[in-house]
Image (tube, rainbow, N blue to C red):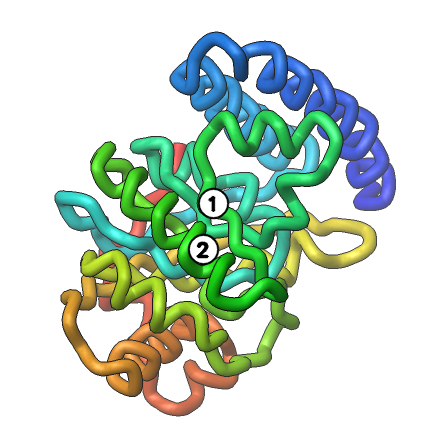
Amino acid sequence: MIRLRTALFALIFYPGSAVFAILGMLAAPFSERMVQRVAYGWSAFHRACAAHIMRIRVVLEGERPEGQVIYAMRHESFFEAIELPRLLGNDPVPFAKAELSRIPFWGRAARAYGMVFVERTQGATALRTMAKAAREYKKTGRDFAIFPEGTRVPVGSAPPLRSGFAGIYKLMNLPVVPVAVDSGHVYRTTPKRSGTITYRFGAAIPPGLDRAEVEARVHAAINALNPQDQRVGVSPASSLPRRPDA
């Protein structure tokens, strides 16, 4: 049955995603807001497919703060990347590797939506371009989202944060909200599985800390659902507000 569900999910979600990418590309010349609505629709479509076909339930723990922030999220699967517009609201601006901007159709829609693309191999020039784009988006009041590990990580692992995270934290001068997520055990498997995915929002970390401290605090918080970390004294889930994300 789970293989059948996975096949049905692929037959519905991926062609539907192509339609949303084309809609985003068509909307791009007219309005950034229209593209953002398409992105939200795609994110909601994905959640509906996950819920009704794969029977994946999403639970939120912790509270999100008021005001503009950077969400620093653990990255176990594509689930949380697709979820960003629906989960965070406020049309969050992701920091993303520049290769994504070159994907046909999707790349054009992504640029129109508003992302900060990072050229990881072009040195100082790329950093200046990234900084300029980030400062412009900051003026809009939109939140930011980053996967500080830099790529998807295996379930149960806790790799160090990429060095670029500290630079972005210093550049943006905004609070950071770390977010743990445990999507890999259901969404990164072949076939995918039914089950529960939990997002745990940690306490906001203020701007202005030194690199070692902010990296240590973010690393601990985004790994709070990691079974290895739970064995060494991470607060239990029962101590945090817990609610299903409808």
Residue 128: image quadrant is: bottom left
Q: Residues within 10 Å of mark 2 (few under 14, many from 20)?
A: many
Mark 2 element type:
strand
Out of 53 and 178, give the one closest to the viewer.
178
**Could you say which disc has been placed on residue 138 in the image?**
none
Can residue 35 be seen?
yes
Residue 140 % position (x, y): 24, 33
- Above or below residue 17? Residue 154 is below
Q: Residues within 10 Å of mark 1 (few under 14, many from 20)?
A: some
- How far apart, in angstroms, are the residues tagged by discs 2 and 1? 6 Å
What residue does disc 1 label? 58
Can residue 48 be seen?
no
Q: Quadrant of the C terminus?
A: top left
Q: Tell me the kind of residue under disc 1.
A: Val
Q: Is residue 41 left or right of residue 55?
A: left
Q: Tell me the kind of residue under disc 2.
A: Thr
Residue under the point 63% across and 40% down: 101
Out of 9 and 17, give the one closest to the viewer.
17
Residue 80 % position (x, y): 52, 49
Do the CB atoms of the residues marked 2 and 1 lie less than 8 Å apart? yes
Residue 223 % position (x, y): 43, 74
Out of 221 and 106, give the one closest to the viewer.
106
Mark 2 vs 1, N-terminal side:
1
Mark 1 element type:
strand
- Above or below residue 161? Residue 113 is above
What residue does disc 2 label? 198
Q: Is residue 244 left or right of residue 8?
A: left
